Image: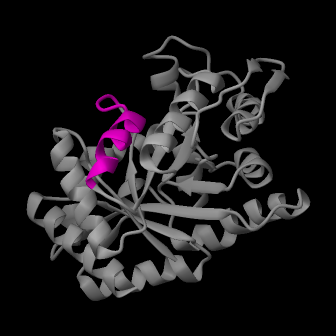
Amino acid sequence: MRIGLWIEEEGLRIDEVGAAAKAAENSGIDRIWFSQRTGWDALTLIAGAAPFTSTIGFAVGVVPIYPRHPMALAAQALSVQAVTGNRLTLGIGTSHPHMVEGMFGLSMDRPATYMREYVEALGPLLSGEPTNYEGERLTARGHIEIAGAEAPDLILAALGPRMLETAGQLTRGTMTSWVGPELVESYIRPTIDRAATAAGRPQPQVVAAACIALTDDPDATREWIRGRFGAAGDMPAYRAVLDRGGKAGPEDTAVLGDESAVAKEIQRFADAGTTEFVFCPVGTPEEHERTVRFALDYAAQQ
């Protein structure tokens, strides 16, 4: 199982992000992950941080698809591939109604259907092939060609059965949020594997991101997570997967405790079929620093 590290870029300058990426690279972290939210553009941030490093992979988890046409996203992703020496993993997702409809004023009708069309249009463009795609809701005609750019790994933030089917049939895998190892084993891994097998594709990646904190007071840290991320439990896609896993909220999916307890839980993810575990450090400044140190040490020992 590979080890990834999510970097909280909010409030950081590019040299600070680059220094964090270099420290991760030196410790053996496989990939650095960034989110696409309301600050840095994640793909641009990767292009800016990559020169501080030489070998580590970079990933965005995830780019919301609705504001970006497949041809626009392909051009940006392949540009990042060219300037980073082909170290990008491109994660895409539908995002959530409060953003797509509330912030952008766009319709989020039938997101699984739209995602299927989006991936069908995007795939050839990322491979440098021309596309002449006309679906029910999306049209893409053209060709993106950037010298030196290889097709990045494309993964899909998939939690529902139809999204997991698309991920298994058309992409390299999925990235999960608010999912514990028991749900990876019982639901995520078998669902995506069945889809990939039916399509004659290799076993997909399952990238599991989890809030994690080295802490002496797990209950207090859960309250911190509830205050910071609790609203995610009201978002339909997240609520569905939390219910499927028998969790009241995001705080119940966190990996918390001392070094031994956290290491045991990470091993449970590996045993469940996770191909990459992404540390998402949370908590107080002291807990965050302790967790990052642990993540770097853990990766160095793998």
> How many numbered markers are drawn?
0
Front-lying residue, 261 or 203? 203
Which residues lie in the magenta part?
38-52
Q: Residue furthest top?
A: 105
**Residue 94 relative to residue 85: left or right:** right
Report the residue at 74% width, 60% height from top. 192
Tell me the quarter of the image containing the C terminus: bottom left
Report the residue at 16% width, 38% height from top. 11
Give how far across and how far down residue 195 sits, in percent. 82, 58
**Residue 285 relative to residue 21: left or right:** left
State the image quarter where residue 190 is shown: bottom right
Front-lying residue, 207 or 31? 31
Is residue 268 in view from this perspective?
Answer: yes
Give how far across and how far down residue 14 sits, in percent. 21, 41
Give how far across and how far down residue 26 sits, in percent. 27, 71
**Residue 25 relative to residue 240: left or right:** left
Report the residue at 52% width, 25% height from top. 97
Q: Is residue 46 magenta?
A: yes
**Residue 300 relative to residue 143: left or right:** left
Residue 16 drawn above or below residue 132: below
Q: Is residue 264 magenta?
A: no
Residue 293 drawn above or below residue 108: below
Report the colour scheme: one colour
